[in-house]
Image (spheres, rainbow, N blue to C red):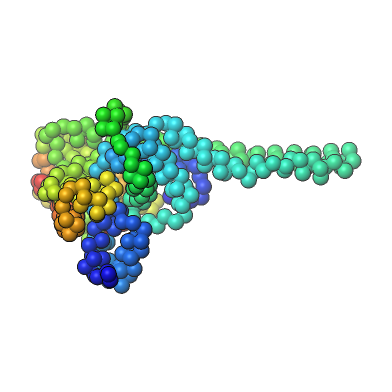
Amino acid sequence: MGRVAAREDVALAVLYDRFSSSVLGLAYKMLSDRAAAEEVLQETFWKAWQKAGQYQAERGSVQSWLFAIAHNACIDELRRRRLEHTLIDEQQVERNRPEAPDLDVQVAWGIERRQVREALQDLPSEQRQVIELAFFGGLTRQEIAAKVGIPLGTVHTRARLGLQKLKQALSVRGVKHEGN
Amino acid sequence: MKETEADLEDLLPFYILGTLAADEIARVEAYLRTNSEARRWVDEMRPVAEALALSAEPVEPDPATKQNLLKRTRKEQEGPAQRPGMFERFRQLAAPLDRMRLETLVVTVSLFVALLSLGWAVSIGREISRLRQEVGDLQASVANQEQIILYLSNPNSRSVVIAGTEHRPQAQGNVIFAPEESVGGLLITGLVPLESGLVYQLWLIEGETPRSAGTFNVDASGQAVVPLAAPKAIAEFDALGVSIEPAGGSLQPTGDIVLLGSLSEDA
């Protein structure tokens, strides 16, 4: 990151090669739109280029930092869409689904990805639903309550319990992150 | 209606999940500044959100996205150098000079440019050599990763977590191997890059006897993907450890042991 902060675009290219497929994976999962996800990807690394000097390793890994930038950009995009009442055509989404990534995806994340998915599957489905609607769907508490048809208080309880159980399930599997 | 502590506690999970409105974020952050218990809860839960982000399947980007990104960075960097009128200003400065002074100026400038070019060529040469080294390292890393993906795709493969010792409690290893195989892979996180002259050495331990399984280094983020090759099935060994040793490795562990764990535990 120091070399990116020193404005070495070769370093930015290395950073991009290392993390872009994971960042794009998150953006695509949240937006279900390849073109919009690629745009978020480019903006994420552009922000990383511009704000590399502000990155603090003790507050988390580079990957976490990039994920946070991308996640915020996706939430903004989802909110903008909801304001415009954009409806996503599920069939269109399926047609636009990209090909599977090459085999040279980062193995480290491959292992962790499998463990996180297993941990998510271990959650009671109603807690998993609230967490996924919030994190990947970008829905607010009130929007989740309306969509699922449950009281706001139940949304709060499920989110809190879900996060705590997920943390335990991840911990059992040995998943941990730099900067915890 | 006044917001109670319970109301703010209700917001905390959504602060972690990143879906609060700007005014709610401001209220939560003010609350966190005054409540250490809430701050601790948020700190504990933050990695969960990071892990959620990681659960998304990676997608290979369109090469055009990278090209556009790098085009933007180069455009930004070239900006000041290509300011219009610079060449024009130089010409205006040179215009009043007579022929003799102009020739002297041209020779001086040429000499200066030649010296600059020489320095630049030396620096480019060093950069090329460094990049070649980087490409070589990356190729080796990709080869290791591809190998481990093969192990992962084996339905019999298992993953065993090896914990960091008191010398490096934040370190962790994930050993991937099939019980009947003598090859596998090890994914390591949380170690620190070592100073020159030191390496990490991998040990497969049978009873009380450690057997070297090679040396490695970690990248700047403390990670490494290490191929594992044993003289017999990995499952027949009791434990795996990693120690810090002089470059070239040792016959027995001599330095701090930073990772140690049983191979028989299920992940």
Q: Is residue B130 above or below residue B261?
A: above
The residue closer to the viewer here, A150 or B59, is A150
Q: Position of residue B65 (x, y in %)?
A: 43, 35
Residue drawn at x 33%, y 35% as measured from the top left: A33
Q: Is A58 placed left or right of B260 in the picture?
A: right
Residue drawn at x 77%, y 43% as measured from the top left: B90
The residue closer to the viewer here, A93 or B101, is A93
Residue drawn at x 48%, y 35% as measured from the top left: B68
Q: Position of residue A77 (x, y in %)?
A: 37, 44
Q: Where is the C terminus of chain A found, in terms of image quarters?
A: bottom left
**Looking at the image, how many numbered discs can be counted on the residues?**
0
Q: Position of residue B61 (x, y in %)?
A: 37, 34
Q: Is residue B23 above or below residue A50?
A: below
Q: Is residue B10 visible?
A: yes
Residue drawn at x 25%, y 50% as measured from the top left: A143
Q: Is residue A105 above or below residue A80?
A: above
